[in-house]
Image: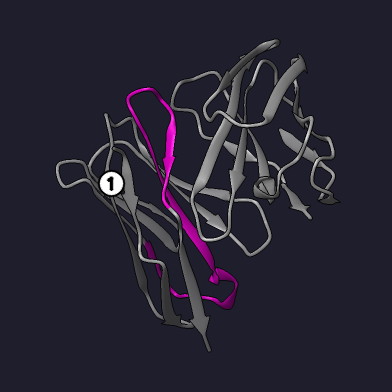
Amino acid sequence: SQTIHQWPATLVQPVGSPLSLECTVEGTSNPNLYWYRQAAGRGLQLLFYSVGIGQISSEVPQNLSASRPQDRQFILSSKKLLLSDSGFYLCAWAGQGETDTQYFGPGTRLTVL
Amino acid sequence: GQNIDQPTEMTATEGAIVQINCTYQTSGFNGLFWYQQHAGEAPTFLSYNVLDGLEEKGRFSSFLSRSKGYSYLLLKELQMKDSASYLCAVMDSNYQLIWGAGTKLIIKP
């Protein structure tokens, strides 16, 4: 069966510091991968998605970036965090079918102080 | 613009039935998803509807009317563990998910 991992689970970072969040998927090949952010009381906001190694699509212009160095690894990064980057970051995977269900990792709670 | 509307919060009693509504206006439609999200946790998939009608899965059912831009999630025989947020998401013409803000369901004994 497929499993998706994210780390760290929680993170407290000062404004201006760098960020690296990692997501890995097991039990499937060539998945579509997604990074979302969820702010309190709001819907999930799609940040990036990837249909293959090195292929990244950005949905929202911001100071975040994403990379997919391996088939089942997806990384979210920032060079300098802003207060507004605080939130719950979720990684998800789906099959290659266009309407395939997205399955979420456990998430990372990021607080920027 | 694209819009998904759900009630912010609902309260129901253990053992009862509750219906959570979702209305949507999107550019195109390729299906509607319902997810459950417990506080502090990730969303988990509940159901997918792409054709009109009712889909039943145990205590949970989901209904879709494409002509009305409307769906509901029906939860029967409510249990305390059903206290969670329920997220409605619509897949648009670009196969991207548009998410509602979620409905927080509070179950009282």
Res. B59 image quadrant: bottom left
Residue A1 in view here: no
**Residue that numbered label 1 is attached to:** B24
Q: Percent from the top left, x then y, of residue A88?
A: 67, 50
**Residue pictured at 84% horizontal, 49% vertical:** A14
Tell which residue pokes out farthest to the left in this image.
Answer: B67
Measured from the top left, where is residue B2 in percent x and y? 31, 39
* Amino acid type shown at disc 1: Tyr
| Within-10-Å neighbours for mark 1: few <14, some 14–19, many 20+ | many
Where in the figure is residue A86, as x and y percent of width and height?
Answer: 69, 50
Q: Residue furthest bottom?
A: B109
Image x and y of residue B7, in percent: 36, 65
Residues rendered magenta in the picture: B74-100
The answer to whether residue B106 is left or right of residue A67 is left
Q: Chain of mark 1?
A: B
The relative height of residue B82 versus residue B43 in the rendered view (above or below) is: below
Q: Residue at x 41, y 25 (%)?
A: B95
* Residue A17 appears in the picture as rendered: yes
**Label 1 SS:** strand
Residue at image point 61% right, 62% down: B38
B30 left or right of A100 in image: left
- Which residue: 22% across, 42% down? B52
Q: Is residue B88 magenta?
A: yes
Residue B55: within the magenta?
no
- Taking A81 as reference, is B9 left or right? left
For this rendering, which residue is in front, B66 or A38?
A38
